[in-house]
Image (cartoon, rainbow, N blue to C red):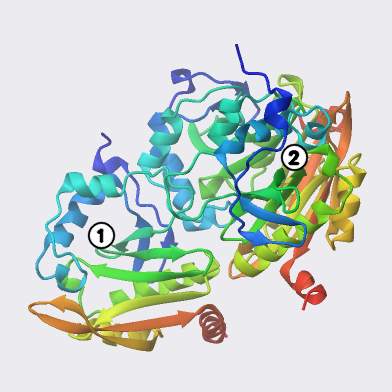
Amino acid sequence: MKEKLSSEETKPKEYIAYPFIEGENVELCPTNLDHVKLYTKWVNDSKARIYARNNRPHTVEDITKWYEPSESRGLSKYVTFEIWHKKDKIPIGTCGYGRINWIDRNANIFMSIGVPEYWNKNLGTEASRLLIDYGFKELNFHKIYAGIFEPNIGSWSVAEKDGFILEGVQKKSIFINGEYVDARSYRMLKKDWLKNHH
Amino acid sequence: MEEKEDIPIMNFIKGDRINLTPLLQKDINLVVCWMNDPDVRTYTRNPLPRTIEEVIKWFEPKKEEVKTDVDFLIYHKNDEKTIGMVGLTDIHWLDRNANLFTVIGEPEYWGKGIGVEAGKMVITYAFEELNLHKVHTSIYSPNERSLKAAAKIGLIQEAVLREEIYIDGVHVDNHKFAVFKKDWLNLKKDEEM
Amino acid sequence: MEPEEVGTFISGKNVDLLPGDNLEHINLYAKWDNDQETRHYARNIFPTTLEDYKKWIEEEKTGTPSQLNFEIYHKGDKKIIGYVGFNHINWSDRNANIGMVIGEPEYRNKDLGTEAAALIIEYGFNELNMFKIGCGMFEVNVGSWKVAEKLGMQREMIYKEQAWVDGKYVDDYKYCIFLDEWKEKRKKLL
């Protein structure tokens, strides 16, 4: 029988994090397989997964495979961080880059606060800003892009506030909640970001 | 196993006298020959004997996520013959630079500017296709032929690392050469006008 | 070669679509994908070896396929001239992307690519129950987006400075067509 997550296991306990990028309220840390049950819970959460496009259930084993250490010491096509809440000392989500193309120097940015109590507190915005700085200043990207579904207003209005530019809308691309919805594509070019951040 | 005759020559990058083609398993014999040849291997840093089985393993398709090397064979169009190998190693995608290497395996083709032509083709590939920022190469002091070739290619000496390499019983200097994307692409534009 | 060896999957006027990923033809695939002209806008930036194709074709595939590949067979000349296929197939969203290469240069600019693409689009809507089919290409690859427009596809996206080609950043175009739009267009194409 698969283990059910009891309320004991989801209460804040002794979590350990190794900060990689420091922010004011949050830190971005490497993912930690000790927290894999939390990650699984977030991926399966009925509210959060709709716009994150997880339309199949995932087991702890599935998620463990995602985060298993790779054999190579070199670069990869994705980078994932755990978002760590400094004051409450607890992981609250994941974020990072996927589909990294090192030749075209671009990547898809993703951000997900998995714990609902931490929504609407601007923590996502803070984590995004840290992540975007990292993408341009450290990973030397030329362009960062994001795909956000039309009904997910919360997400794309934050993107626009952060300075992302709408490249276009792909009509009826995704089937969600019984109907086809549009997918918005946002971009941020390094030169545009530099203009706003000296 | 396919017959050699059935496998067409695949011209990945086309040049004047030479084309650059992929390194296929059927070519490994020739490559190992060059790696072991005492005249060819002097300045290419092959101090240990290599077997065919070993080298086949090196060039097997890897599971790696991001490539750090690219290898080409040098194919002489007129003589219809594979005469050497050229490419990039140590590709650093974040810093956007890579090391250029050239091996002319067949001695009759030395001193004919083949290395220069091959080097130019790979450098153009590095900047126009791989979007690299800098291409560098290491040439050791006794290797006068390569030092001359580097200048002809347009590589600029950046530094001399003294007594860094051990060849033929002595420590010799390592000359580091490099070229940058904007300089290279501007040069190309001028040449085309 | 005779298509009876593996069977004609889709029959057209000048071309047929045969099952792709044929281990006996990897020499051809490698020749096309490595050729400097052919690969120019096809995003083959690294050389591919015969061993690479063997590995990809022999790899164990689990779950629903995310791609389906076909060979383009010229009926008159009895010759395989290229390949076409679906990639990024999303079965829940019922959409997919098309990729195509006419590998043999003498067969380009003869509307054979348009015909092959029309056959696979028809297959996608009519048999795979797709809702939306798309394809992407660089803005500089004019030949490719002219074919997309001939097929009745609409440009839905321009991704600025998306790819590094020939020493500079170029835009990427995305075209698409929906089932109901194809139902109209196919009357003229098939």
Residue pictured at 65% horizontal, 28% vertical: C13
Is disc 1 on the same chain as disc 2?
Answer: no
Marks 2 and 1, how far apart at CA: 42 Å
Residue C134 tag number: 2
Q: Is residue C110 above or below residue A47?
A: below
Q: Residues within 10 Å of mark 2 (few under 14, many from 20)?
A: many
Residue A81 in the image, given as x and y percentages of width and height:
64, 50
The one nearer the camera, C57 or A120, is A120
Residue B56 in the image, given as x and y percentages of width and height:
24, 46
Residue C171 tag number: none
Residue B6 in the image, given as x and y percentages of width and height:
30, 40
Q: Residue furthest top?
A: A1
Question: In the drawing, does residue C35 fall left or right of residue A102?
Answer: left
Residue pictured at 44% horizontal, 64% vertical: B91
Question: In the drawing, does residue A167 fall left or right of residue A40?
Answer: right
Q: Quadrant of the N terminus of chain C?
A: top left
Can residue C139 be seen in this snapshot?
Answer: no
Question: Which mark is in front, 2 or 1?
Answer: 2
Chain for disc number 2: C
Can residue A63 be seen in this snapshot?
Answer: yes
Name the amino acid type tagged 2.
Gly
Residue pictured at 88% horizontal, 23% vertical: A178
Question: In the drawing, does residue C138 fall left or right of residue A125?
Answer: left
Chain for disc number 1: B
Identify residue for label 1. Answer: B82
